[in-house]
Image: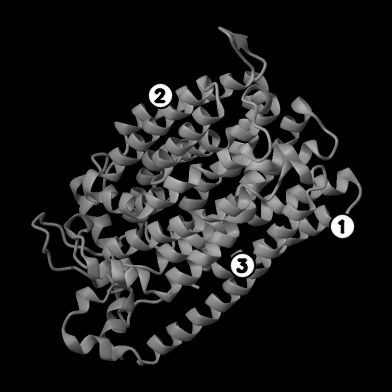
Amino acid sequence: MDPNEEKLDHAEEIDEKDTSGTGYTHVEDPVLEKKIVRHLDRRILPWIFILWLLAFIDRSNIGNAKIDGLIDDLNLTGNKYNVSLTVFYILYVLIDIPSNWLLKVVGGGKYLPMLAVAWGIVGTCMGAVKSYGGLIACRLLLGACEGGMFGGIILYLSMFYKRHQLMFRLGVFYCAAPLSGAFGGLLATGLAEIRYGGYNRWPWIFFVEGSITIVVAIVAFFFLPDTPGKAKFLSEEEQWYIVHVLRADLQGAAQSDRIDDEKFSWSAVRMALLNINTIVMSINFFLILVPIYSFSLFLPSIISGLGYHRITAQLFTVPPNFLAFLVVLMASWISDRIKMRGPLIATGLLVAAIGYIMQLAAKSPGVRYAGTFFVASGVFPCSPLILAWLSNNLAPHYVKATGLGFIVAVGNCGAFVATFTYLSEDAPLYITGHAINIGAIGISLILTLGNILYIRWENSARASGKRDARLQHGRENELGYRHPAFRYTL
């Protein structure tokens, strides 16, 4: 038997010799691990969930403002509204990779709340804009401030949880995205009725929601830990234990005993960007985000096109988004249980395709509205699934940081397509927009199935010893995900 495989088969015996200087030796203890994970869940997940909920509300509340007077008050004729959506992503996609590099330097527990304070300030200022130019400037700055958040949260959570504990935690934070559509729609319905101080209706959506973000982020700054080894709510023994459990979970791909000790190198950047999983999944994420962003930004307009107006249209955005919230949680839990990502992505894409077919083929407003439920419940789970898929298949830290930054950057370029899928001249049927989205879903399904086949082939090659030659150079700690003992997640 390969000695590396034997090492994995006896994970409970790893690190029994104390090399930490703490006096503790590592023997696998499921009870202790469960206790530590509960501590992490209670202290980290609520803050991450709330921050991402606010992030998605602050970027997509412009869709609510649109049907509450923004278009008329700022004279957004032609495609000006769509341009204002698009510019958000210019700086958003450029900042992803360097932001992930910076996260570990600053400390994730401080860096993520700092980003939230910044975009909360910008979001609040959006309520005061009086011109198209002012709106463009705010949307650019909002994108710059939010740019590091998505990939940063995924990287941050991967520093605290084992690979097949990660998906459910990503699901918990990501389900805030569809919930933001439900919660944001209800909140916007009430806020848009405010008329005070010369600001009527839509500005109050930005004023109130941006201010909430600032307050929550300031509080989160004092509660989130930077790394497992610096989590003050864990005892010294618990800190040491979880650090070594996470190292063992990487199956030989770890660079050092502690993530705090890993150093940036350009070789890690090359390893991340030349990985087949990174390339294929980044293109796939681009395709998945086309329907997700167009759905989030234009659902109020789509529902308005069914014959519902203002308050009714806002309220009708709630049910499909709430269903998506539940489905994201369920899919995330199932994914970790079966330790698979790709098959669930394929299933979600098929469900979303049914929803768009209903939009295109049905004449009844009721059937077309029902189609929004299929779209939401099918496409929203695909985003956290594919990000967890790539995170599981990259190691060590800076390889993962670069890969996650890259996939988020490439994926969010899908927003440039999404913001022009539903044009005002295509109302009320929006046939072009629905057709673009179903095309993106079809190509994404092909890439997903192809990636599943590649991973099966590569894992089989490693299991049969065809990659063992990589161990002959005496530099095992530099192999990362290329280590023969490392298995890709399917």
What percent of the width, then of the height, locates residue 438?
71, 61
For the residues labelled 2 and 3, say whether their Cβ atoms are less than 8 Å apart: no
| Residue 183 to residue 389: above or below | above
Q: Residue at x 52, y 47 (%)?
A: 174
Q: Residues within 10 Å of mark 3 (few under 14, many from 20)?
A: many
Q: Which residue is mark 3?
A: 444
Q: Nearer the viewer, residue 1 or 315?
A: 315
Q: Earlier in the sequence, mark 1 or mark 2?
A: 2
Q: Residues within 10 Å of mark 1 (few under 14, many from 20)?
A: few
Identified by mark 1, the residue type is Ala
What percent of the width, then of the height, locates residue 241?
24, 56
Q: CA distance from mark 1 to mark 3?
A: 22 Å
Q: Residue at x 31, y 91 (%)?
A: 1
Disc nearest the viewer among 1 and 2:
1
Q: Residues within 10 Å of mark 2 (few under 14, many from 20)?
A: few
How many numbered marks are there? 3
Q: Earlier in the sequence, mark 2 or mark 3?
A: 2
The secondary structure type at the circle numbered 3 is helix
* Side (left or right) of 229 relative to 370: left
| Residue 48 to residue 13: above or below | above
Q: Which residue is mark 1?
A: 361
Q: Residue at x 33, y 74 (%)?
A: 481
Q: Which residue is mark 2?
A: 215
Q: Nearer the viewer, residue 389 or 418?
A: 418
Q: Nearer the viewer, residue 2 or 32?
A: 2
The secondary structure type at the circle numbered 2 is helix
Q: CA distance from mark 2 to mark 3?
A: 39 Å
